[in-house]
Every structure is written in structure tokens, then in C-alpha cells.
Image: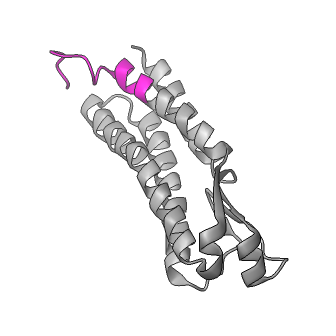
Amino acid sequence: MTNTTSKILFASCAVLALSTLPMTFVWLEIGPLGKAYYGPTVPDVYIKGTYITGKDLSFYPILWAMLFQLSTIICYSSISLLLIKTITRRIAILSLAIFQFELLILFPGWLSLYAQGVIDNSDGAAADLTIHYGSGLVVYCLLCSLHLFNLIRLGFFVRGQHIT
């Protein structure tokens, strides 16, 4: 594998991860019971890469969850950009790429906990929230595929290969 191919793949991962920042991952639609409890103008809740709408950010657990998700996406992107610079050290590349892959694997579980925390914090609307998944998850799946392909190209899944 050439260094150029790896650089292109890591750059693509960074661009894809950064593109998820404004995208919606989960949309929690308020139903009739929630509108009856909060009033007809209560907004739906959107969990985006950088922000959550329809919730009060003065409630610290929601604010921290939002900042944690934002910092994780930025961390993943920063590591991808760092890997473009350190493409000559194979063991360093594999270590960081594996850490990135772990972040990707843990993201659906994190997103589920985040959405459930928002639902649990919704008082009277919690019984009537409908969960919809957004375009951010499509990009997430594409990012997982690209990252897995990159790990295969780096030789991580090849048995008997010496890593230096």
C-alpha cells in the first residue's frame, strides 16, 4: 500500500467526521401527550453532532453530553489529520487508527445512552416521544466502512504480517 492511498483515506475520514457536525443523528418527535403537557409550541428535539435543540442546556448532564459528543467527533477528526502527518511510523498509525475504530464502535452505544438520557429528562413528554434516525447515521456507516477498509489496507487484519 502506498503512503498516498493512506493519506487520502485518512483525509476522507477526517472530512466525513467533520461533515457530521451539523447533521442530525436522532430526532425525537413530540407527540400529542407531550404537546398537551408542555403546550402546543413545544419544539421537537434534534441531537446533532454539535448541538441539541429543543432542550434546556442549563441542565448540566445534557450540556455535558452535547460537549462530549462534539469533542469526540473533533478528536476523531484530529487523529485522522495527525495520521496524515505521521504516515511513516506504522506502529503509531495502527495504534491511533485502532483507537479511532474503538471510538466508532462505541458511538452507537453512546448515542443510545444520550437519546435515552434526553427522553428520561423530558418529564411529561417522555411517554410520547417518537425516535427517528437522521442523516448523520448514514455518514457514520460510510465512515465505519471507510475506516475498516483503511485498517485492512494497513494490514491490521492480515495474519503473520510483521508490524514495524
Q: Is residue 133 left or right of residue 112?
A: right
Q: Position of residue 150 (x, y in %)?
A: 42, 25
Q: Is residue 121 left or right of residue 75?
A: right
Q: Is residue 150 above or below residue 115?
A: above
Quick one: quadrant of the N terminus? top left
Residues 142 and 6: in front is 142
Q: Position of residue 66 (x, y in %)?
A: 55, 68
Quick one: quadrant of the C terminus? top left
Q: Is residue 58 left or right of residue 64?
A: right
Q: Is residue 155 left or right of residue 83?
A: left
Furthest residue toward bottom: 58
The colour style of the image is one colour
At horizontal 48% and vertical 28% (from top left) the residue drawn is 145
For the question of whether residue 7 can be seen, the reply is yes
Residues 59 and 152: in front is 59
Magenta span:
148-164
Q: Position of residue 129 (x, y in %)?
A: 65, 65
For the question of whether residue 16 can be seen, the reply is no
Q: Quadrant of residue 105?
A: top left
Residues 119 and 25: in front is 119
At horizontal 50% and vertical 41% (from top left) the residue drawn is 81
At horizontal 77% and vertical 71% (from top left) the residue drawn is 43
Q: Is residue 121 magenta?
A: no
- Looking at the image, how many numbered discs can be counted on the residues? 0
Residues 83 and 43: in front is 43
At horizontal 67% and vertical 43% (from top left) the residue drawn is 135
Q: Is residue 82 above or below residue 87?
A: below
